[in-house]
């Protein structure tokens, strides 16, 4: 809601492979498995993109960084629950 520029992204999750792909205007900006090291790369790619937006929700709020990926790609999870303490949603 606070970052409408995210609507430009094409995000696909391959549930079987536990792999997330993010594309912008047909160009892959991230394509990673959901293991811990690769999750950081996914977050970094998304963070880099958001920082270029005119409606950047992090402007003036460095405490919101770095981004962290919530969930494991398998277990259903509502992002606003108490288990997300310490995570940043955009």
Image (cartoon, rainbow, N blue to C red):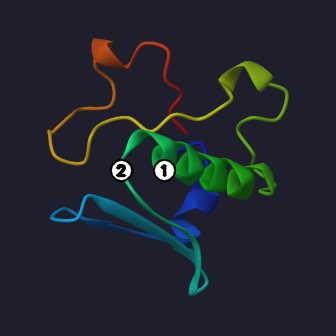
Give neighbour class at mark 2: few <14, some 14-19, many 20+ (Cα, 10 Å): many
- The residue under label 1 is 38
Q: Position of residue 53 (x, y in %)?
A: 77, 56
**Position above or below: 85 against 9:** above
Q: Image check: 7 left or right of 61?
A: left
| Residue 74 locus on image (x, y percent) | 16, 46
Vertical placement of residue 64 versus 53, above or below: above
As rendered, which of 90 and 36 lies closer to the eye? 36
Q: Secondary structure at mark 1?
A: helix
- The residue at the point 53 percent across, 53 percent down is 42
Identify the residue at image location x=38%, y=62%. Answer: 20
Is there CB contact under 8 Å for labels 2 and 1? yes
Q: Is residue 30 above or below residue 56?
A: below
Q: Nearer the viewer, residue 36 or 52?
A: 36
Q: Out of 8 and 77, give the one closest to the viewer.
A: 77
Q: Is residue 81 above or below residue 16?
A: above
**Residue 84 placement: quadrant:** top left
Q: Secondary structure at mark 2?
A: loop
Residue 60, position as x, y percentages in the image: 85, 27
Q: Which mark is residue 62?
A: none
Q: Which residue is mark 2?
A: 34
Task: Count neighbours of disc 1 (C-alpha within 10 A) and say few if under 14, some if 14 to 19, many if 20 or more.
Answer: some
Q: Position of residue 77 (x, y in %)?
A: 20, 34
Total label count? Answer: 2
Q: Residue at x 82, y 35 (%)?
A: 59
- Residue name at image x 61 percent, y 84 percent: 25
- Does residue 57 appear left or right of residue 32 in this picture? right
Q: Quadrant of the C terminus?
A: top right
Marks 2 and 1, how far apart at CA: 6 Å
Residue reaching furthest bottom?
26
């Amino acid at each position: 809601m606070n970052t409408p520029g995210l609507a430009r992204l094409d995000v696909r999750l391959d549930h079987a492979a536990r792999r997330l792909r993010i594309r912008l205007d047909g160009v892959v900006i991230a394509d990673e498995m959901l293991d811990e090291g690769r999750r950081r790369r996914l977050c970094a790619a998304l963070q880099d993109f958001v920082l270029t937006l005119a409606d950047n929700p992090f402007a003036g709020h460095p405490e919101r960084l770095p981004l962290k990926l919530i969930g494991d790609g398998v277990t259903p999870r509502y992002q606003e629950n108490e288990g997300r303490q310490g995570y940043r949603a955009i």
